[in-house]
Amino acid sequence: MSNKPKIFLLSFEIVPTADNQSKSIVESGYTICLVCSEYPEDAYRKAKFFVEKADWKIIKMNEDFPPFPIEVTEEALSENTENLRLYRSAQEKGIAIDYIVAAKEGTGIQKPTMLPHKPSYQFDLNNSLKRQKQLSDKGRCLHYENGEVCNEVINAHSIQKSQALSAIAENGHVYMPLGDINKGIIYKKRGIEKQASTFLGFCKKHDNQLFEPIDNLPLIPTEQQVFLYAYRSLCRELFVKQNAKDSIDFVIETTQANKAIKELNAGIKIGTEFSLKQLKIHKQHYDDSLKNKRYSDIQYTLFISKQKPNVVFSGLLLPDFDFSGRTLQDLGNHASNLELITMCFAPMNNDEWGFLLAWHKTSSKVCKEFMGSLATRISQSSNVGDLLFRLIISNCENIAFAPTWWDGLTEDARTHIKQRAESMVNMLTLVKSDYLMTGLEGIVNWEFTNVICN
Ligand SMILES: [Zn+2]
């Protein structure tokens, strides 16, 4: 892959809103927005949000510019130093905007002026981060028999440590994605003992007792082992989602926000509450099976590789689109219950490892269609490694990369991975129905020698 990340140019005609700090002197103006994005419609949504967030009302697209976002190159902008600065800033930060405004009569300012960017909305980053830290430090045992016995909640690994994280680590460290308020997702080195993939979702007793068959033994696979891999992914996601809900409630309660931010936060809250409700329903199904030792309620497909692992992960998804771009279930329909599939890296015997896709039988309708579309794409000679890598980069934030592998990738490959991961979590980007069909080819080079299903 040699194509550079795309940068789109668009321009809005604007007037200040009542919250705008420059409203007493500014009559109207226009923006120059440069947006890093895969698609023009996403560039438009992102630019619109940032302009409205900065207390401007958008009147229409600026008629001196094309009526839609157009892709621009660094060369095309190279004659104008300000445009070039904007372009590089968009490359680095994902978006860059200049506001060029005309002053009101009587202010004595004649020429159109470039305005410094000063939105009324100030996000209290420190406060919010402190809150998130408090929430993730608040342990609780998610075992179905939780209660008085759970006296010591531990930092449990959601990705197996002894043979998964340690298999890819270098000096005890791996790369993991972290959300950054200004830079989107960044990949940082994390220590595998205490930082990487841990969560306070089980007490010591229950964690040891329950996950012993997968923490101390390689994947055979038995149905019990597969069940436990899937269950741990689900519990970790539930833990994270509960914190996300508390966190957005806190943000809404404690921050002064303008209309654009309020609408965004309200949307996040509705989405988070709906996902949390879905995860609780699934956990109930898993708990019922677990209590009765009905491990055969789990269904799975396991791809086995003999290669040295370079990426390890644990996650899940409510499949909305399949590998051929068809709709499987509508995530926007909050009246329905959605089916769920889990994805885990699992160490196996003889230095092999498995890419495990597993689902509870109550999710078999959607998951079988999802897996069927994967099988179809493989039979049409799509590269299995590319399909599975695309799946986890798009859906799994609980993922770790071997430092030697990550550092050896081209800058472009790293940017494509980052962009794909961001596009899937960004509230301002619509998930495309064909997101599992293309992208990220030729980066990982996974080969699988065998496939097992139950
Ligand atoms: Zn417990």
Image: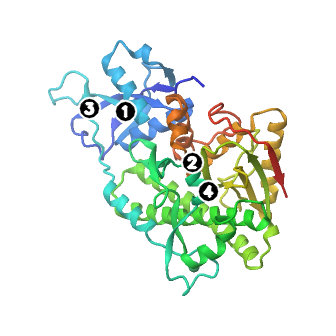
Residue at the spot of label 3: 115
Q: Which residue is mark 2?
A: 168
Comparing labels 1 and 3, the label whose residue is closer to the camera: 3
Find the distance from the CA under tag 4 to the CA under tag 3: 55 Å
- Alpha carbon of mark 1 to alpha carbon of mark 2: how far? 51 Å
Say which element carries label 2.
helix
Q: CA distance from mark 4 to mark 1?
A: 56 Å
Residue occupying image coordinates x 61% and y 56%: 163
Q: Assess whether mark 2 and mark 1 are in contact (beta carbons under 8 angstroms).
A: no
Which numbered disc, 4 or 2, marks the residue that appears first in the sequence? 4
Left or right placement of residue 132 versus residue 332 in this view: left
Contact, CB < 8 Å: mark 4 with mark 2?
A: no
Q: Is mark 4 within 8 Å of ligand 1?
A: no
Q: Of the residues under marks 1 and 3, which one precedes in the sequence?
A: 1
Q: Which residue is mark 4?
A: 163
> Upstream in the sequence, badge 2 or badge 3?
3
Observer-nearest of 184 and 254: 184
Disc 2 Cβ-to-ligand 1 distance below 8 Å: no
Identify residue type, mark 1: Ile
Q: Amino acid at mark 4?
A: Gln
What residue is disc 1 on? Answer: 14
